[in-house]
Image: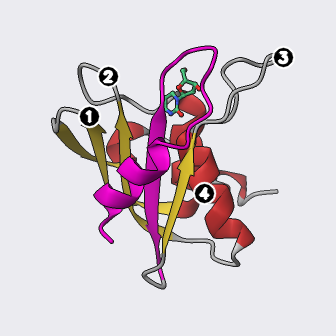
Amino acid sequence: MSLKDAALSVRENAYAPYSNFKVGAAIRSLSGQIYSGCNVENVAYPEGTCAEAGAIAAMVAAGEQELTEVYVVASSPQPVPPCGGCRQKLAEFGKRDVKVVLASLDGAELKTTIGDLLPGAFDASHMEDV
Ligand code: THU
């Protein structure tokens, strides 16, 4: 299954009764395995957990800690930009040159990278003097 198909498929499972905005994300790990996640909202924190965070959590739970490719799809008129928190999470587990495809349901795709999504990212190198 392609990353795109995995993201489209998991998006169907999104739990988004507050925003009605379903998002699906699929990531490929260093081993080549695909992990997917959808957004899961709740009444106390209606923004809930983002699809990207769900996919990353699945990868880490399976024992992997590096992602090499990302695909995110939502029912937006234009490819949906990941939120700030998700950009930081992607940067935690993927190198700057990792390809990220943002897509909308009508097939529009915006190709970018983790580095372009979060320029000047804070990372472990900034704590080297500690
Ligand atoms: N959302 C994601 O899952 N990923 C994104 O990249 C943007 C936003 C979700 C969070 C929330 O459930 C809904 O979209 C509206 O913000």
| Mark 4 burial class by Cα count in 10 Å: few <14, some 14-19, many 20+ | many
**For marks 1 and 3 on the same chain, the one whose residue lies earlier in the sequence:** 3
The residue to which callout 4 is attached is 56
Identify which residue is drawn at 63% across, 49% down.
Answer: 54
Q: Is residue 4 magenta?
A: yes
Residue 88 in the image, given as x and y percentages of width and height: 57, 42
- Disc 4 and disc 1: Cα gap in Å? 22 Å
Q: Is residue 21 magenta?
A: yes
Badge 4 marks a residue whose secondary structure is helix
- Disc 1 and disc 3: Cα gap in Å? 28 Å
**For marks 4 and 2 on the same chain, the one whose residue lies earlier in the sequence:** 4
Q: Which mark is residue 79?
A: none
The residue to which callout 3 is attached is 44
Q: Quadrant of residue 105?
A: top left
Identify which residue is drawn at 29% across, 67% down.
Answer: 2
Identify which residue is drawn at 38% across, 29% down.
Answer: 81
Residue 49 in the image, given as x and y percentages of width and height: 67, 35
Marks 2 and 1: CB-CB under 8 Å?
A: yes
Marks 1 and 3: CB-CB under 8 Å?
A: no
